[in-house]
Amino acid sequence: MRTYTTSRSSRVPLRSSSPSDLSSQEHSRKRPLSERLAFHNIPQPLKRARTTASRSTPISKHKPKPKHKYKSKEDRPPKGLTQLHFTIDSSILRTCSLCDLTYTKGAPEDETLHTSHCARVQRGMQWRRDEERSSPEAQVSEIATGVKLKDGKSGRIISVNADAGGKIGSKLATLLQTISLHLSSPPLTRDVLRVSKVYLFLLPSEKSLPGETIAGCVIATHISTAMAIASPAEVQGPAAETPSDTKPVQPATARLVSVDTNSSLFCRPEPLSTPMGIPRVFVPSAYQRRGIALRLLDAAAASFVHGCPLKPCRGEVAFTQPTASGKALMEKWGGGGVRIYQE
Ligand SMILES: CC(C)(COP(=O)(O)OP(=O)(O)OC[C@H]1O[C@@H](n2cnc3c(N)ncnc32)[C@H](O)[C@@H]1OP(=O)(O)O)[C@@H](O)C(=O)NCCC(=O)NCCS
């Protein structure tokens, strides 16, 4: 079976079961190849052709010698037997250190998929301005031009309907597929795409290439409710009143929803009315830490609801379960006000 996966598994959708148990759920993981092979790879003792007697033992004259022990040549055992060993330490799976994709080494389809995926994750995809006019139903709008980045370069931000068809639709589909693969997240459903907009940061391409490069992407979608992130004090809970107090105390996090135990990200379980969700944010590695994600989030918050700019610090925007860098971005952008919603 051929599997494309990424070694990062941080974006497992939130579960709606009981509060506080989200991160404790066991996520289905493929068993390592070595583990799967171990059972079958115990070297079996060689089955040698049994000799009934040694040369020194005289063969009884009365025992008639069988004329043909083997019916055909094929039945005869090979003369020199060789013990074969299955080497399990050289896996056929390879994980790329640049794009995190795990693929089957030597399988042409996998190698091709990896090459194109890796290029997109590092350097982004190309965008052609003339395509904007060819797909009017995509409703491409220019949100901002001359947007300056930290490195002095400037680009523009556009928004596109996430369920666009035609050439733009297939470009968006490839982009969304790349992002999902990179984040190990499920694809966004049609229902979600129907109420979503894609915000793209476009930089003029290098001299050798015509058009522009998609140097960042934010998906914004309509949601109804989200949960507020619990403060560090709520997560830690009050200090024990007296050291001699031996009464069993419920942990402070017992009434909170655990989003990510590694980063101690907990939410209050109450659903709060929230108009905009950010299910995906992605910036190719060559363009990271230049402020592109912040510029895109600003653009989405300012334009997603017509005539009503949204403020992340007031809890009007929510992320889905963030990755480590997504959490850092969320905190920098919303200063603790960004909420979390279930995708
Ligand atoms: C997360 C991601 C979108 C950030 O994009 P970006 O354009 O590099 O982010 P910005 O340059 O706007 O960063 C803004 C701030 O966010 C924080 N931040 C962003 N990436 C960070 C990282 N990898 N580590 C720590 N902090 C980070 C920093 O505070 C940063 O400000 P600074 O550069 O002045 O320190 C990008 O790293 C990415 O695509 N990662 C892979 C996909 C992913 O994890 N997406 C998030 C899904 S929730």
Image (cartoon, grey):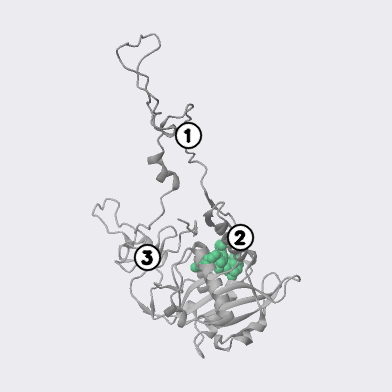
92 displayed left or right of 241: right
Q: CA distance from mark 3 to mark 1?
A: 60 Å
Instruction: Return the residue nearer the eye: 96 or 18.
Output: 96
Between label 3 and label 2, give the one nearer the viewer.
2
Quarter of the image for residue 121 reads bottom right
Residue identifier under label 3: 234
Q: Residue placed farthest to the left in the image?
A: 247
Q: CA distance from mark 3 to mark 2?
A: 46 Å
Image location of residue 302, percent across then percent down? 54, 84
Mark 3 or mark 2: which comes first in sequence? 2
Instruction: Locate the N terminus and report the quarter of the image it occupies.
Output: bottom left
Residue identifier under label 1: 84
Query: Which amino acid lies under the numbered mark 2 shown in the image of this protein?
Result: Thr
Image location of residue 19, percent across then percent down? 31, 66
Residue identifier under label 2: 115
Instruction: Locate the C terminus and report the quarter of the image it occupies.
Output: bottom left
